Amino acid sequence: MNATVSLNLIQTGVLLFAFIGAVRLVGVDRHTTRVVFFAFAMACALLSNLYWLTYDILRPETRMPFAANEIGEWALFLLLGASLGTDSVPGALHPEAVCAALFSTASAALWIAWSGEWVQDILTGAAYGYFICRLLVRIRREGVFSGWEWVVLAAVCPVLIAAQASIFFVPVALKRPLDLFCYALLFAVAVLMIARAVPALKKGAPAEAAVLRTFAAYAWALTALYMSAGGFYTAALMLSTLCILLMFLALRREAAAA
């Protein structure tokens, strides 16, 4: 059993814990709709993980074709986005939503270039884009991020996409340093997001801020996961698992504060 399979088993356990915990919160939290969507999202992620683990056991080291676990991931993103509520100004064009759409589109283009799987990468990019659009608009509306955090995101995202795309065109000698530079950006922002999310869980801090910060940390951990390979993929998987736990703790704290 390799490290990735072991970590997926751990993540499956965390997903099961979060799912059961969210189900128990239903009826207790006044934000019942959010908790219900989150519970369904965890159920979809859990089924996706179980499918992937079963496939890996039956066909180890074999590339997975378009499969049911992809549908589970799309449902995860759509449900997490729906849990954030609807836009209070229907049809409004938010700059954050535009930037999120551009980032998810560019990310999907990179995934296609790496894997050659057009259909599933386009659909994954669309679902993920919906999630981060909803998330960033809500973060801006609630004033959760400070000015310097928006500056960091605005600077890192285009640089990251440009650096990842450049790897296809630079000389061989520059590919590895540029790749490491991308990993440095991905994990630096992931650590920053988590470091900002954890203090938001303490008593006295706004419950909504805790939810949005943990969701943001998870969204970036997924970005790192989808742009990583080898040991870096394993590290990103660990961070995404931690963020799942943080999201549940934030929702539980929101329920306690209701």
Image (cartoon, helix red, strand yellow):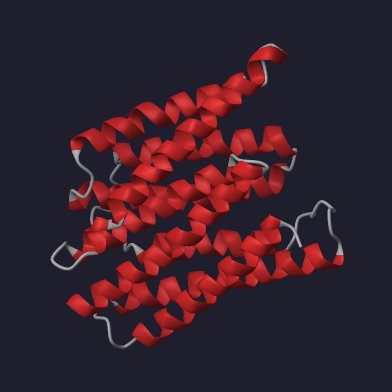
Asked whether, in this view, residue 164 is left or right of residue 29, the answer is right
Q: Nearer the viewer, residue 251 or 133?
A: 251
Q: Nearer the viewer, residue 214 or 92?
A: 214
Image quarter hosting the N terminus: bottom right
Q: Quadrant of residue 158?
A: top left
Q: Nearer the viewer, residue 41 or 134?
A: 41
Give the farthest residue toward the left.
204
Q: Image point 39% across, 87% down: which residue?
A: 24
Asked whether, in this view, residue 127 is left or right of residue 189, the answer is right
Residue 22: x and y, percent?
Answer: 40, 79
Q: Quadrant of residue 13?
A: bottom right
Total tally of numbered discs in the picture: 0
Relative to 218, residue 47 above or below: below
Q: Image point 27% across, 30% down: which residue?
A: 151
Residue 175: x and y, percent?
Answer: 65, 20
Asked whether, in this view, residue 155 is left or right of residue 104, the answer is left
Q: Nearer the viewer, residue 86 or 71?
A: 71
Relative to 136, residue 69 above or below: below
Q: Image point 64% across, 15% down: which residue?
A: 174
Q: Image point 18% across, 76% down: which residue?
A: 257
Image quarter hosting the C terminus: bottom left
Residue 82: x and y, percent?
Answer: 40, 64
Residue 127: x and y, percent?
Answer: 53, 53
Q: Quadrant of residue 58?
A: bottom right
